[in-house]
Image (tube, rainbow, N blue to C red):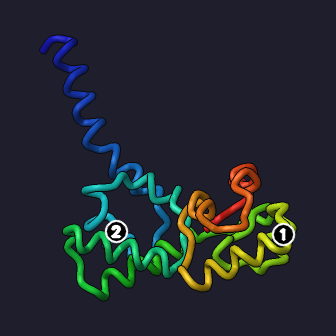
Amino acid sequence: MTKRVLVSMACLVFSLLLPWAAAADLPEGPGKDILLRACVGCHKAQEFAAYRHTKDEYQSIVYRMAERGARTSTEELETVAAYLAKNFPKVEDPSRVNVNKATAKQLETVLGLTAKEAQAIIEYRDSHGQFRVWQDLLVIYGVNGRKIEAAEDRMTF
């Protein structure tokens, strides 16, 4: 065999084994095997460590993936959501405020809003539901959009 053929074969073997090597880095526990079987076909194993969600958020995500074709039972989906929530939990940054959970006073303090602006956000949230991104706040009457944009890096949702 030529050197070129050997190099090509080595690259092919490496590319086939890489996903399983990355899977070895995932923490052991109930749900890992299901995650590898049902999810790694569409997602890279090493990407799971970057995800940070609450258990409820993980449940929504895994059920959405099941609707898109992941072959798992309801019990397996619950196991995967619990595995992800335990091993890759959402950690709140103390320098940020969760706009969907914050009090008016917290919004004032962390985002630099007036009491009236913070109250407008709370009232809008109560009547329209949770925000997904900072741009959702721009439609609220009485809230300064420039302040919101300036504070986008201090918000979570």
Q: Position of residue 38 (x, y in %)?
A: 26, 67
Looking at the image, the residue that sits furthest to the left is: 1
Secondary structure of residue under mark 2: helix
Residue 53, compared with residue 22, is above or below; it is below
Which residue occupies 39% across, 82% down? Answer: 79
Q: Residues within 10 Å of mark 1 (few under 14, many from 20)?
A: some
Q: Residues within 10 Å of mark 2 (few under 14, many from 20)?
A: many
Residue 62, compared with residue 154, is above or below; it is below
Between 44 and 101, the residue placed more toward the observer is 101
The amino acid beneath tag 1 is: Glu
Which residue occupies 22% across, 32% down? Answer: 12
Which residue occupies 30% across, 63% down? Answer: 39
Q: Position of residue 43 (x, y in %)?
A: 33, 55
Between 18 and 140, the residue placed more toward the observer is 140
Q: Quadrant of residue 127?
A: bottom right
Which of the two labelled residues, at mark 2 and mark 1, occupies the earlier sequence position? 2
Q: Is 145 displayed left or right of 66 in the figure?
A: right
Secondary structure of residue under mark 1: helix
The residue wearing badge 2 is 35
Q: Is 24 displayed left or right of 102 in the figure?
A: left
Q: Position of residue 11 (x, y in %)?
A: 27, 28
Residue 42, compared with residue 83, is above or below; it is above
The amino acid beneath tag 2 is: Leu
The residue wearing badge 1 is 108
